[in-house]
Image: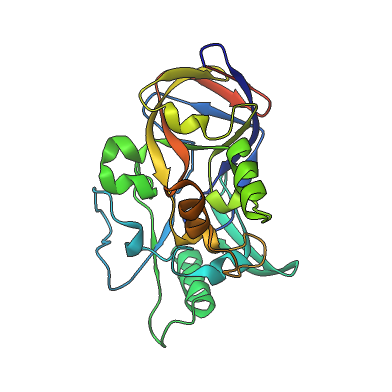
Amino acid sequence: MTGTRGRVRELFVYPVKGLSAQPLERAELRPGEGFRYDRRYALARPDGAYRPGIQEGLSKREFFALVSDHRLAGLGTHLDTATDVLTARVAGHEVLRADLRTERGRDGAEGFFARVLDLPAGVTPLLAREPGRRFTDAAAAGDGPMGWISLVNLASVRDLESRTGSVIDPRRFRANVLVDGLPAWSELELIGREFALGGVRVRAVHRTRRCAATEVDPDTGRRDLPVVTMIDRTYGHQHMGVHLEVLTAGRVERDSALVL
């Protein structure tokens, strides 16, 4: 596929693990690092392995996230990355505004999500943040994988749609980068290869095995489509997309070229 060109169609960052995607026009990247602010915060299970100051990656099961807590997708959330003010909306109405730089704001956010998650009285999630660390799923594999970015090929999503007769929102896969113009599923053969993504060099390092989080509609929060089963039955694997390691500093923008 040398010389094949694709295009970046969408860029997303997820400032709080398990909460809403925030679209970007561009992203500045540095070697070995992911999107700035990506998975900067997480809602840790109070009876889990997370403790403030921890310097190791943890399984996604240590956090409240869509894989097990689909009702989080029913919220429209936004983190102002300049001020760390987190807002949440339901049906267009603001139901949370919390300054996560303050103890009062963090306590308010934890209490709000305890109610959303229907936790027992007196039990709240722990709002996790550790400077220099990201709560990505890949972080459980080590500090290097913590800085990977995720890419999904829209042609692969469309192929799955056509073969299963389903409508599949690509946002279900919670990728940082959505690309088009590549042959369906060709991204899975890129492992170990370097290529240009906008103004940066990246290397495809890992196929992304999908989990039950993809069953959740990103707008309604309903668990309504067995995406992993559909992929497995159709193709004999459970992958959609790949993880990339950033090799050089530079900028990726919407409509940037992907050149193999």
32 or 98: which is nearer to us? Answer: 32
The residue most toward the bottom is 121
Residue 244, given in percent of the width and then of the height, sits at 42, 31
Task: Give the image quarter of residue 258.
Answer: top right
Q: Is residue 18 visible?
A: no
Residue 4, given in percent of the width and then of the height, sits at 58, 16
The residue most toward the right is 92
User: Which residue corresponds to the image point at 42% horizontal and 88% vertical from the top-left?
Assistant: 121
Is 159 above or below relative to 18?
A: above
User: Which residue corresponds to the image point at 24% horizontal and 48% vertical from the top-left?
Assistant: 55
78 or 2: which is nearer to us? Answer: 2
User: Which residue corresponds to the image point at 53% horizontal and 57% vertical from the top-left?
Assistant: 227
143 or 81: which is nearer to us? Answer: 143
Is 120 above or below relative to 154?
A: below
Is 230 above or below relative to 159?
A: below
Q: Is residue 235 visible?
A: yes
User: Which residue corresponds to the image point at 48% horizontal and 56% vertical from the top-left?
Assistant: 228
